[in-house]
Image: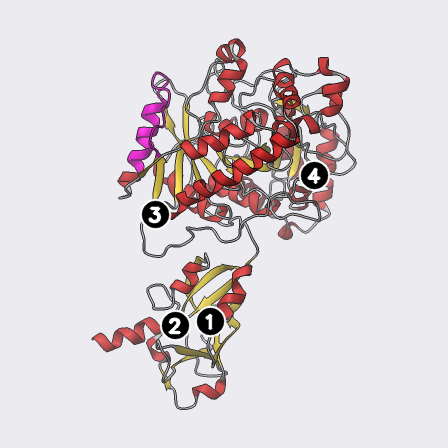
Amino acid sequence: MTAPLPLTLADWAAAYATGADPAVLLAAALGRLPADDPAWIHRCTSEFVQAQCRQLAERDRATLPLYGVPFAVKDNIDVAGLPTTAACPAFAYTPSVSATTVQRLMDAGAVLLGKTNLDQFATGLVGTRSPYGEVPNSFDPAFVSGGSSSGSASVVARGLVPFALGTDTAGSGRVPAGFNNLVGLKPTPGRVAMAGVVPACRTLDVVSVFALTVADAARVTALIEGTGDEPLFQHAASRPAWLERTGAPLRVGIPRAPDCDVALGYAQGFDDAVAQLTAWGLAPELIDMAPLQAVARLLYDGPWVAERYAAAQGIVEGAPEAMDATVRQVIEAARGHDAVAAFRARYALEALRREADALWQGIDVLMVPTAPTCPTRAAVAAEPVLRNSELGRFTNFVNLLGWAALAVPSGFTARGLPFGVTFIAPGGADAALAVLGARWEAARALPLGHHLRAATPADRALQVLPGSAPTLQIAVVGAHLSGMPLHGQLVERGCRLVARTTTAATYKLYALPGTVPPKPGLARVDADGSAIELEVYEMPRDAVGSFLALIPPPLGLGSVQLADGRWTHGFICEPAALAGARNISHFGGWRAYLASFTR
């Protein structure tokens, strides 16, 4: 019996660290892809994979965070030299340049194994609308896999690749994750480059990531995020509302009426998820979802369907018989909308956005069922539009509002089907969602994918986080520390705590006289230095200017060396101001110095 192949990114890294050869491991990974598997539209040839391996051998492994890791991409995402079909053979073309996201992964050392099936033109949440075959649920083939990123979810759930790219307009990167016991990370719209992706709704689309763990999804997202010189239709928010409300319990909203499928066990699944929140000591807030459902109706009942028409216009008008009948029906509905309807819908969206954004005044994150039910393939065949529309109740509104979302496994029903929840937060909260998601999966302790194995601490270790906007790390040593008088200035700017550590042992700390509130001054010295307590925060760059304006002399922002040798930006003091100031370095930090007055 052959040894099992690695599953997670940690597994693959460990295999290579012990001397495994990428050419051998990847040949084995490619060889186990079934020829009749409907999850794949195109399996890479051995020559294509080995050519990637040869390129790896010519590069510095230390610079490749995904060295030799196999992956797959949804077949509406371009790969140079391979056909892109969008699940419509008559539409197929072969690009000479890979999508930006694919190229970034290959630049990081990842190796492509193939392109995956989807609901044609990414139109559907079921995974059955493809001439390449229906992708079954990986736990029970009688049920749908979810779509449109059906193939990408299936190959990750079965352990064929550790991660795959999908796209998400209305839930296509979340619903399949929920149906297959996976993590589906949907970034803030406008944060990930969309060049080389066949659009569904170009102004709303986002490339998403399927993985077995939050840590893996976060690492991959961090590698692909960032836009190029392409047109941007949504600009990623940079100051999420709930990053590090220091010391305050998380405020979680849940739907007042989730209306999940009782017979399937989804209602019990969501009750169990809510019980997890209460076990954490949280008190979920019941949310009226009506404004969000009104936004959701705009997506398919409104003129945004015209964007799908624009993407597939050549086929719709020139060869409509080449299209899936249901997809054609959905896209041709665009003919019922005109420019006046488009602008009226945009006005309605902006009015609803004000109501929706008001949610974040009372909650930090919204937890919803990823989908309220999971239909059988037979049920979808009988009523394809109705059964599909039911699945987007908690997903359709997210991209229209520019929000971030993370789908995570939550449990299993009595008949063994996965049940998942999705955490939704304001745009820009991708990193915070990853932190919350990692805590969630640790608490739920579910097996990876299709019962592949239990997760290990290495699998779940959050080593890299996505960031939805450029940030700057700033070290603080005094009144900006958590619990101190000026810490609110960091909270107001959406700063995220990165580390509690100390400086290198080459600094002295002084109590500055006459400062209000009392503040210390930090100075680097050549001899007799100490390690001084500090906290490192990640601040959105667009908030740095307003923060600098609040720093009074003799303090300023300079460079500070940390205990591990790294340098970061941080508070320093003008040397002239230290004359006559009390040296308090022996306390080890400002907090300990202040505590000495209460002893």
Image check: 527 left or right of 589? Answer: right
Mark 2 / mark 4, whichever is N-terminal: 4
Segment colored magenta: 255-276
Mark 1 / mark 2, whichever is N-terminal: 2
Does residue 67 show up magenta in the picture? no
Q: Tell me the quadrant of the picture where the C terminus can be found.
A: bottom left
Q: Amino acid at mark 3?
A: Leu
> What separation in Å lies between label 4 and label 1 (alpha carbons)?
43 Å
Q: Position of residue 431 (x, y in %)?
A: 48, 48
The answer to whether residue 411 is seen in the rendering is yes
Which residue is the site of mark 1? 550
Q: Amino acid at mark 4?
A: Ala
In this picture, is 272 found above or below 471? above
Q: Quadrant of residue 385?
A: top right
> What separation in Å lies between label 2 and label 4 (alpha carbons)?
46 Å
Q: Position of residue 441 (x, y in %)?
A: 40, 38
Which residue is the site of mark 2? 478
Q: How many marks?
A: 4
Which residue is the site of mark 3? 250
